[in-house]
Image (cartoon, grey):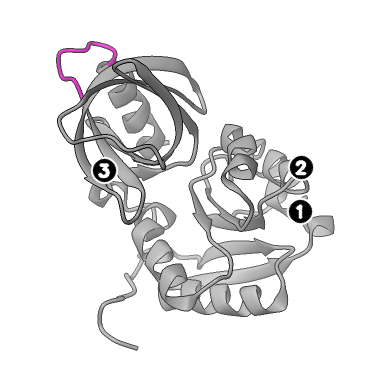
Amino acid sequence: MGNSFVALTSSRKFPLRAALVDLHEQSRVMLSECFRHFGIDAVTMTSDHAPRLAKEKFEACVVRVGSHAEPILESARSSRSNSRMVIYGLGGSVKDAMRLSRFGLNAVFQEPLERPAALKLVKATQMLVLHEFRRYVRIPLVTAVSVAAGKENFTASSVEISSGGMSLSTTHAVNPGQSVEVSFALLTLPRIWIRGNVSWSKPASKTIGIRFDQRDERRLRIKEWVESYLES
């Protein structure tokens, strides 16, 4: 293993744990190794044991994307101890992931699962799992985003969000500098509309970056939500 992935130490008395729910053996083994690399213990369980998510403390959860995930995530989000746990989806389509957005799906492992990509995703989100919020100003969160760009309107999915902007996954081509208005909802934040500009575009990865207009006062609601999310 190279030095590009470095596990961070934690001052917690108890180990950090990630629940792996209803995963196939190959995926379970690979993700267990990825989490362990960053000092996070993986706990395997089936959906029959999902009530554990309402009773025991977990810092993260990986669940297969689909209709069977809903009761599992409902159990986790209704728990006081796990209401802010980091939730990863595994597989499924973008449409399937959007159905789970109300549970605050943070990120999705794509299938077929590949170790380099899995390690990269865990590394990108480990600050949230470790609760090192001061070092992580961007929140990975998957939710549907409506984008109005001039006379064109299209739907994208969020990748990360901060108080100053957000990154989106979309097949729609837009150019840096283009003015847009985006609309989305975030867990406890009702649907909000805000103006912005496309700050960057990466056609290869089908992602774009939106910088919120600092003159748009609605940005303060997003800033308050981000701060509340990180402090809870």
Say what amino acid the circle numbered 3 marks: Val
Secondary structure under the numbered disc 3 in the rendered image: loop
Tell me the magenta residue range.
Answer: 212-218
Residue 103 location (% of width, % of height): 60, 37
Say what amino acid the circle numbered 1 marks: Ala
List the residue tagged with mark 3: 137
List the residue tagged with mark 1: 50
Q: Is residue 190 above or below residue 197?
A: above
Q: Nearer the viewer, residue 207 or 21?
A: 207
The residue under the point 69% across, 51% down is 53
Lower sequence index among marks 2 and 1: 1
For the N terminus, the quadrant is: bottom left
Label 3: how many residues lie within 10 Å, few (<14), some (14-19) or many (20+)?
Answer: some
Lower sequence index among marks 2 and 3: 2
Q: Nearer the viewer, residue 83 or 30?
A: 30
Secondary structure under the numbered disc 1 in the rendered image: loop
Residue 112 location (% of width, % of height): 58, 70
Pointers 2 and 1 in contact (CB under 8 A)? Answer: yes
Pointers 3 and 1 in contact (CB under 8 A)? Answer: no
The residue under the point 50% across, 74% down is 114
Q: Which mark is residue 105?
A: none
Is 38 in the magenta?
Answer: no
Say what amino acid the circle numbered 2 marks: Pro
Type of secondary structure dominating the magenta stretch: loop
Q: CA distance from mark 2 to mark 1?
A: 8 Å
Residue 73 location (% of width, % of height): 67, 44
Q: Is residue 114 above or below residue 162?
A: below
Q: Nearer the viewer, residue 210 or 225?
A: 210
